[in-house]
Image: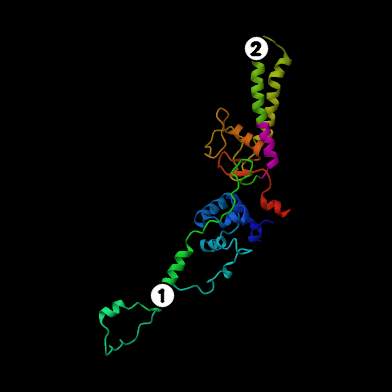
Amino acid sequence: MNDLQQYFAGHEQFIELLEAVGIGTLEQFASVDPLTVLPELHQAKRMLKLNTAIPPAPLFRAWVEQALSSPTAPEPADLPGAQAPLPLAVPIAEPATPPAAPRNPVPAREKRQRPSDSPAKHLSTKARLQEEQSYQPAKPAHAPQEPKTYLRKKGVRHMTPFRTWLGAASVLLLFVSILFSVAVTTLVLLNGERGWQIISLCFGPLFLALILYLSLALPRKCSVCRAHVFSFKKYTRNKAAHYLPLFGYVFATALHVFLFRWFRCPACGSSQQLEKTRVEQSKR
């Protein structure tokens, strides 16, 4: 169990939601800006269809501020001022009868020069300062940043990781078979050879690779939007999808899955990994 899971003990789905937006350690959580992270958490919750509750902005800000000083996340009842919040102003009861004028009235100049000692104004100013300070962004903690590399798995866990990896391998085999068939057919036509053996040599590997593609790669779907990952069908592609010139989206996505074990969906652009997330690995 790492420090983030110890801090949010009993909130496994909320930890998974944090990892979906790229927060994997307690130091990273302590350096985030709640005004930026909260909209991303709500969007990831809708995409992943999770039932976890996202706290309001004041409670989330308290979690961020006490992340490095408290062993566990404080509950709303444990926060300072939760039972008796500080009022913004103290009401002043108006007198029933107007007060009598003093015998020695103070000049107007002295009244202007005297500081106001009203407790209501003092409390109102103090409450306003606390309110403004509570909505200031948290100071970023000096935490080591993880290297942004393709070797690090990103996103949520894919529902069928092994079958998706086999589908990516069949897509790569299909492209290799197409290039092999074109090269062998060109040599056969130039040499003028004929026969069933030559035809099977030219189109046999392509036919087998096509069968593997239709059975292994084509049924694979995205775990978020349920779109076909290795489909050549023309639909609106996401800007974050993998793409290689002259090869397109399907070959680039299959190559990325085969090499790095994670990919971005060509339709919705969500990152998905083919291995268990940190939360699932800690439960074992």
Residue 88: where, in percent of width, then height?
A: 43, 72
Disc 1 marks a residue whose amino acid type is: His
Report if residue 167 lies within the magenta region: yes
Labelled pair 2, 1 in contact (Cβ < 8 Å): no
Report if residue 258 lies within the magenta region: no
Magenta stretch: helix, strand or loop mostly: helix
Compare marks 2 and 1 and give the one earlier in the sequence.
1
State the residue in front, 48 or 14: 14
Query: On the image, numbered disc 1 is attached to which residue?
Result: 122
Question: Which residue is at 48% across, 64% downward?
Answer: 134
Badge 1: how crowded within 10 Å, few (<14), some, or many (20+)? few
Residue 219 visible in the displayed image: no
Residue 90: where, in percent of width, then height?
A: 42, 77
Furthest toward the top, the residue is 192
Furthest toward the bottom, the residue is 103
Estimate the spatial distance between the alpha carbons at disc 2 and disc 1, rounded to whole Å. Answer: 96 Å
Give the quadrant of the N terminus.
bottom right
Disc 2 marks a residue whose amino acid type is: Leu
Badge 2: how crowded within 10 Å, few (<14), some, or many (20+)? few
Instruction: Answer above or below: position of 137 versus 154.
Output: below
Label 2: state its secondary structure: helix
Question: Which residue is at 27% across, 84% downward?
Answer: 106
Q: Which residues are magenta?
A: 159-171
Mark linked to residue 217: none
State the residue in front, 237 or 156: 156
Mark closer to the observer (2, 1): 1
Mark linked to residue 189: 2
Residue 93 visible in the displayed image: yes
Residue 277: where, in percent of width, then height?
A: 66, 49
